[in-house]
Image (tube, rainbow, N blue to C red):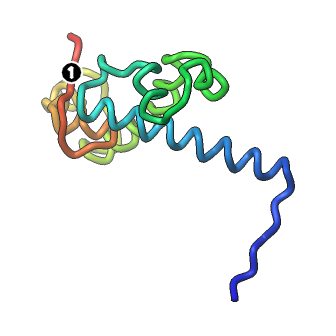
Amino acid sequence: MTERKTLSPKQRRQRNREEMIEAIVNSARQIMREQGVAALNLNEIARMLGMQTPSLYEYFPNKLALYDHLFPGGYAAFSRLHGADPGGCGSSGWLGRGAASDDGLRSMVGGESGVVQTAV
């Protein structure tokens, strides 16, 4: 028989909050993988999760805060794919090596396939 750790109400709220943030982030990644980064919007995330858009503001005050949350993981994935040091825009950096490819950009949104939209 497995023992269950009883969580306090505060711990349960924290766990539920973390689970909801993870669900929001996963939905955002799915949208970006399937439709591109430009297609990301809070209305679509709320629809996917079966909640009202204003409820998302409890977790992220705006879309930029969601991007800020997504960036470190995407940056790490991009770094692993194209070398540990981005190296700027010089010939030894990502852009100089042509790393701004669809594959590299897909790693930013946690996907192997999908549409990636870039702005130059």
Q: Quadrant of residue 75?
A: top left
Using a 10 Å C-alpha cutoff, classify the residue at mark 1 as few (fewer than 14 neighbours), some (14 to 19) or many (20 or more).
Answer: some
Q: Is residue 57 above or below residue 10?
A: above
**Residue 110 placement, left or right of 58:** left
Element type where label 1 sits in the image: loop
Q: Residue at x 67, y 25 (%)?
A: 58
Quarter containing the N terminus: bottom right
Image coords of residue 86 (percent x, y): 32, 33
Q: In which quarter of the image is residue 27?
A: top left
Q: Give the residue type at disc 1.
A: Gln
Q: How many labels does the image show?
A: 1
Q: Which residue is drawn at 58% across and 25% down?
A: 56
Quarter containing the C terminus: top left
Image coords of residue 31 (percent x, y): 32, 31
Q: Which residue is drawn at 51% across and 25% down?
A: 66
Task: Say which of 53 and 93 sits in front.
Answer: 53
**Residue indicated by mark 1:** 117
Image coords of residue 85 (percent x, y): 34, 38
Q: In this view, does 11 lie above or below 42?
A: below
Q: Which residue is drawn at 18% across and 36% down?
A: 114
Task: Say which of 95 and 14 sits in front.
Answer: 14
Q: In this view, does 104 lie above or below 55?
A: below
Q: In this view, does 71 lie above or below 8?
A: above
Task: Say which of 9 and 101 sits in front.
Answer: 9
